[in-house]
């Protein structure tokens, strides 16, 4: 009756917790993501094997014979005649597009949420089947946020599959186009910190691209370094404010000038994950 296309922790978490609906799952298609430390591919494969669920790697699946294809964490186009049901990490019509959860966290939204909708040609424009949201407080790292929205995914999935299983009507409503916003795709250049931002936004940015992502980056003396954690510290009056310059260095770490506010960095990593030794350095300028 349904095919599930999944990528990442959210899909694994949902599959793990919908055992009562395994009889209506025809098959699972699994994607891989090289841009995260763990894409949960192996976990999904093992789950399918242990529960006798047929599964395929992306691009190796046969023509779909199911009534619905459910997309969880999926980021590829799906040319198909089968009805698509999409799970999206935002309260649509806000944050249509890519990395909506990261964008919401960087912006400091008070709520994060999930929308279940019908897929159509214009991305994330389909009729809404349901939405769930949760209040968040900062600081909040992306792995914690993913766990929060995974609970919302599960709740919406159970509602949808219960209707399918019981043969009930699938109701939906159209989005308000006047309220639509978009979130752009991200690549390697988007991991670099803009030190002209205020310290709170930079802190949220660092937390938003931490594990399972590869971490926020900055350039120092021609080297690219990663920052995985930070701490906001009390600002001081700076007569010639220059975002990105180190202003203080003590046993806690380096304090960096932001467009507004100061940020303490305790540890810096090179691309090979080795520590960057700044013990004999002070006059450092952090740049994009």
Image (spheres, helix red, strand yellow):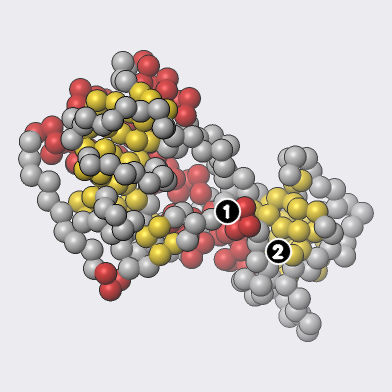
Report the side of 123 relative to 160 (left or right). right
Q: From mark 1 to mark 2, how far is it between C-alphas?
A: 14 Å
Corner quadrant of residue 76: top left
Q: Tell us which disc is closer to us: 1 or 2.
A: 1
Number of numbered tags placed on the structure image: 2
Residue 165 coordinates in the image, percent (x, y): 13, 32
The residue at 84%/63% (across/down) is 284
Q: Between residue 66 and residue 212, name the one nearer to us.
A: 66
* Tag 1 residue: 187
Residues packed near mark 2 inside 10 Å, few (<14), some (14 to 19) or many (20 plus) = some
Q: Between residue 212 and residue 145, name the one nearer to us.
A: 212
Counting residues from the start of the chain, the first of labels 1 and 2 encountered is 1
Secondary structure beneath label 2: loop
Corner quadrant of residue 60: top left
Q: Between residue 56 and residue 255, name the one nearer to us.
A: 56
Secondary structure beneath label 1: loop
Name above or below for residue 164 compared with residue 226.
above
Corner quadrant of residue 80: top left
Residue 6 coordinates in the image, percent (x, y): 38, 36
Name above or below for residue 113 compared with residue 8.
below
* Tag 2 residue: 288
Report the side of 132 relative to 40 (left or right). left
Name above or below for residue 248 compared with residue 230.
below
Dot label at residue 8: none
The residue at 79%/68% (across/down) is 245
The answer to whether residue 79 is visible is yes
User: Which quadrant does the N terminus fall into?
Assistant: top left
The residue at 70%/64% (across/down) is 288
Residue 22 coordinates in the image, percent (x, y): 24, 24
Residue 35 coordinates in the image, percent (x, y): 57, 42
Report the residue that reaches farthest toward the right: 280
């Amino acid at each position: 009756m349904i095919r599930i296309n999944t990528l990442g922790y959210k899909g694994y978490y949902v599959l793990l917790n919908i055992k009562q609906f395994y009889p209506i799952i025809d098959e699972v298609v699994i994607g891989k993501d090289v841009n995260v430390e763990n894409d949960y591919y192996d976990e999904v494969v093992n789950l399918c094997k242990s529960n006798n669920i047929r599964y395929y790697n992306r691009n190796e699946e046969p023509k779909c014979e199911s009534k619905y294809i459910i997309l969880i964490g999926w980021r590829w186009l799906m040319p198909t005649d089968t009805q698509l049901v999409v799970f999206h990490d935002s309260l649509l019509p806000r944050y249509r597009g890519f990395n909506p959860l990261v964008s919401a966290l960087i912006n400091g939204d008070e709520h994060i949420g999930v929308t279940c909708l019908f897929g159509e040609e214009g991305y994330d424009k389909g009729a809404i089947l349901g939405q769930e949201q949760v209040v968040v407080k900062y600081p909040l790292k992306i792995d914690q946020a993913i766990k929060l929205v995974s609970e919302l995914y599960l709740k919406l999935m159970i509602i949808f599959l219960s209707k399918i299983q019981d043969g009930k009507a699938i109701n939906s409503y159209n989005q308000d186009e006047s309220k639509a916003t978009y979130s752009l795709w991200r690549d390697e250049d988007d991991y670099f910190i803009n030190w002209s931002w205020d310290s709170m936004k930079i802190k949220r940015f660092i937390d938003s691209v931490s594990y399972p992502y590869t971490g926020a980056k900055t350039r120092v003396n021609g080297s690219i370094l990663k920052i995985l954690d930070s701490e906001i510290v009390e600002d001081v009056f700076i007569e010639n404010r220059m975002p990105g310059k180190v202003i203080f260095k003590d046993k806690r770490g380096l304090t960096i000038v932001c467009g507004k506010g100061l940020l303490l960095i305790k540890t810096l990593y090179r691309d090979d994950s080795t520590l960057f030794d700044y013990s004999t350095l002070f006059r450092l300028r952090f740049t994009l």
